Amino acid sequence: MNKHILIIENRSSASISGVRKADSFSPEEIAVYTEEGDLIIKGRNLEVDEFNENKGELKITGRINSLSYRSEKQHIPDNFLSKLFR
């Protein structure tokens, strides 16, 4: 298990470790699954500068407005949604 660390600099960049999976990316929202549950980052002009899936490291830039976590118990597995819309 990788340690989950989140570092934000001046609300314009972030480095995140302990990322298990990248769920989605857009200029307004980045969603990732971390060792501590789902992490949703909202803002403007968000971009993924670097994502190393093997190391579980993610670096983003843009205006960070909010961060929120959902616990692992609240995580909806990908296959649940695909089964729902079959």
Image (cartoon, rainbow, N blue to C red):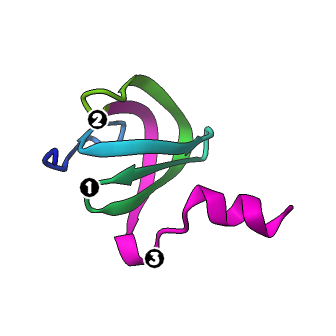
Q: Badges 1 and 2: C-beta atoms under 8 Å apart?
A: yes
Rounded to the nearest angstrom, the CA distance separating label 3 from label 1 is: 13 Å
Which label sits on residue 7? none
At label 1, the amino acid type is Glu
> Which amino acid type corresponds to the residue marked 2 in the rendered image?
Gly
Residue located 24% across and 44% down the image? 18
| First-in-chain label (1 vs 2) | 1
| Residue that badge 1 annotates | 35
Q: Is residue 43 magenta?
A: no
Residue 71 at least partly seen: no
Give the residue at mark 2: 56
Instruction: Say if the magenta span includes residue 79.
Output: yes
Residue 73 in view (yes/no): yes
Q: Looking at the picture, how far across and down is residue 26, in whole percent? A: 62, 40
Which of the marked residues, 3 or 2, is nearer the chain's N terminus?
A: 2
| C-alpha gap between disc 1 and disc 2 | 10 Å
Q: Residue furthest right?
A: 86
At x 60%, y 46%, the residue is 28
Residues rendered magenta in the picture: 58-86
Tell me the element at label 1.
loop
Left or right relative to 44: residue 54: left
- Residue that badge 3 annotates: 74
Q: Residues within 10 Å of mark 3 (few under 14, many from 20)?
A: few
Residue sitting nearer the eye, 16 or 54? 54
